Amino acid sequence: GAVVSQHPSRVICKSGTSVKIECRSLDFQATTMFWYRQFPKKSLMLMATSNEGSKATYEQGVEKDKFLINHASLTLSTLTVTSAHPEDSSFYICSAPTGETQYFGPGTRLLVL
Amino acid sequence: GESVGLHLPTLSVQEGDNSIINCAYSNSASDYFIWYKQESGKGPQFIIDIRSNMDKRQGQRVTVLLNKTVKHLSLQIAATQPGDSAVYFCAETNYGGSQGNLIFGKGTKLSVKP
């Protein structure tokens, strides 16, 4: 199947700092990518849809100024958690569609101290 | 057996037995469904998909069944192996495939006993 990568895989930061997470489609182009958040023992919850060349679409309850999304190219989307707080600690996962299927990255574990 | 509580539903099976994981989806307009496998600390891994114009699809050791009448999806794993231990999620979309966002089910944790 297609390969989606994320970087970093794990990040620890201090409260109040910003963290950028990258999502790359390695062997295909994606005009759309999706960002999900997952809490322990819970399912994935869609945060936003990243659109190449236009603004991201955010799900209800997700603060766009808090979670900045930039779809810089057809193979790269970034999620920046601004002014991170401990409650932002979570597992962030991106996905990119190709063909009929969406493929997921390996996830980024964020811990805010 | 299967248990539901405060945490993910868990299905425990003996190695070599067949596993059946069930999922009730929410949107009768959904036309594309995917099963994902998620191991601890990793992203979901595609297993098998099915379109709404089908009621069964088979892969290697896996079969997905779709019952649109009762909005039910199941994943059957033949000859379950320890490496199959993971959390399994069903996902649905009504955008006909990959361009729409997926709605995930709650997940089922599969534990395989050697």
Image: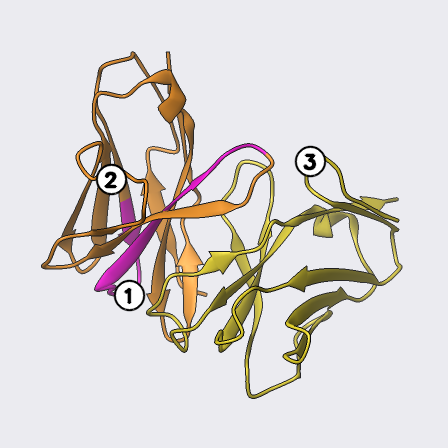
Chain colours: A orange, B yellow
Image position of B112 with respect to A75: above or below: above
Q: Nearer the viewer, residue A27 or A88?
A: A88
For residue A28, which numbered disc appears in the image? 1
Q: Amino acid at mark 2?
A: Leu
Image position of A12 with respect to A25: above or below: above
Label 2 SS: strand
Circle count: 3
Q: Amino acid at mark 1?
A: Phe
Residue range corresponding to the magenta coloring = A23-40
Marks 2/1 same chain: yes
The quarter of the picture where residue A54 lies is bottom left
The chain holding disc 1 is: A
Task: Pinpoint residue A32: horizontal percent, then vertical percent.
Answer: 25, 61
For residue B89, which numbered disc appears in the image? none
Q: Amino acid at mark 3?
A: His
The chain holding disc 2 is: A
Q: Nearer the viewer, residue A39 or B68?
A: B68
Please tell me which of labels 2 and 1 falls first in the chain. 1
